Image: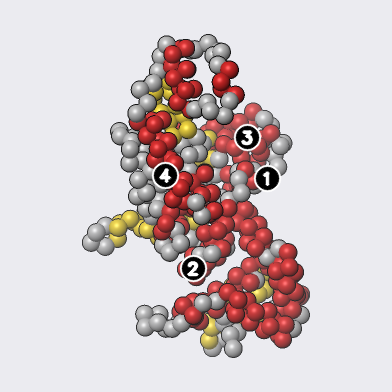
Amino acid sequence: MCRRMPWPASISGSGFQRAEVIIWAAVYCGKKVIIILDEYDTPMQEAWLGGSWDETVGFFRVFFNSTFKTNRHMERGLITGITRISKERVFSDLNNLKVVTTTSDQYATSFGFTEEEVYRALDETGLGCRKEGVKQWYNGFTFGRHADIYNPWSVASFIDEGGKYRTYWANTSSNGLINSLIQTGNKDIKQNFEILIKGGSFQAEIDEQIVFNQLDGNTDAVWSMLLATGHLKVLEVNAVGEDQAQIYTLALTNREVEVMFKSMVSGWFSGDTGMAYNKFIRAMLNDDVDYMNEFMNDIALASFSNFDVAKSVSSKDAPERFYQGFVLGLIVDLAGRYTVTSNRESGLGRYDIVIRPLDREKGLCVYHRV
């Protein structure tokens, strides 16, 4: 182990370079150094959101080459991140990379706490009676064949706060990329997202090689991103078709992620838009059809595309399903006070949406498209 290094005076100057730090450390300690780069993809995500993607990719190509490939003073390097960025030649100048992802068995139990470790910690801190709640809130991460991996930050924070259930992990970052992908996603993304926040699951193909420039138009790429970031978990994997394509059954990871996403959706309706949305909910509950119609027309004119509601040969009921998904999205905020169901058989036919109050004395709201 190297002693504390007497950094040269030039380290405080603006011209002091990373390479000089590495050389100085190697020379002073008499051995090659280990370089650890944590969350390398965070600035790349911000660059993708901010419109400076090409410039950032160019910087990292040079940075990785000089720091990890041609640096003769490096013994070993470790790069961590939640996404594996590929097909952008970011790592093209690096050789002999060993990549460990969420589907790898190696180090699977090192990325979080195992259930045995969590339960032992809860017992030792007098919170043993909260095991089931902690499991629902912070369990669900899957690495390789290990399905019961707990979020270490959330569990540690839960214990430190004396057993209060909160979205500890979700509050450690802005989740700007996730927010953007869902809010600006196509109708398929929004419909599947609705399924997720209602506790359901759906199937999709997953590619661990995240391609950022495909996120705008590739639905499966979005789900691949959410799986890589830990917001989704894999319930089942099946090989389908002649090419044995891997189809993943996906669901929200745990209660903490569910609460985070519901809060995110509520945030979309904050401010002036939120006030109008709240008026829409009140109008619906008070049977004010005129205001409901005005509000929905304004949203449709401002947001909908012809492609969203156009009929197609392969799916003649696509416009109908799109409008129904739109209405379901408007009333998702009522989930805490009402039971919302759609497309269920009733009487001689099938209703579109029914809102049943948890307090049955308050009546029943039925929605039919006109």
Colour option used: secondary structure
Mark 2 or mark 4, whichever is nearer to me: 4
Mark found first going from the N terminus, 2 or 4? 4
Mark 2 or mark 3, whichever is nearer to me: 2
Mark found first going from the N terminus, 3 or 4? 4
Mark found first going from the N terminus, 1 or 3? 3
Between marks 3 and 4, how big is the CA–CA gap? 38 Å
93, 274: nearer the viewer: 93
At x 33%, y 36%, the residue is 94
- Looking at the rendered structure, the secondary structure element under dot 3 is helix
Between marks 2 and 4, how big is the CA–CA gap? 30 Å
- Looking at the rendered structure, the secondary structure element under dot 1 is loop
Mark found first going from the N terminus, 1 or 4? 4
Give the x, y percent position of residue 207.
37, 53
Residue that label 3 marks: 156
Dot 4 amino acid type: Gly
- Which label belongs to residue 165? 1
- Looking at the rendered structure, the secondary structure element under dot 4 is helix
Between marks 2 and 3, how big is the CA–CA gap? 37 Å
Mark 3 or mark 4, whichever is nearer to me: 4
Asked whether the residues under the numbered discs 1 and 4 touch, taking CB atoms below 8 Å apart as contact, a structural biologist would say no
Q: Is residue 145 visible?
A: no
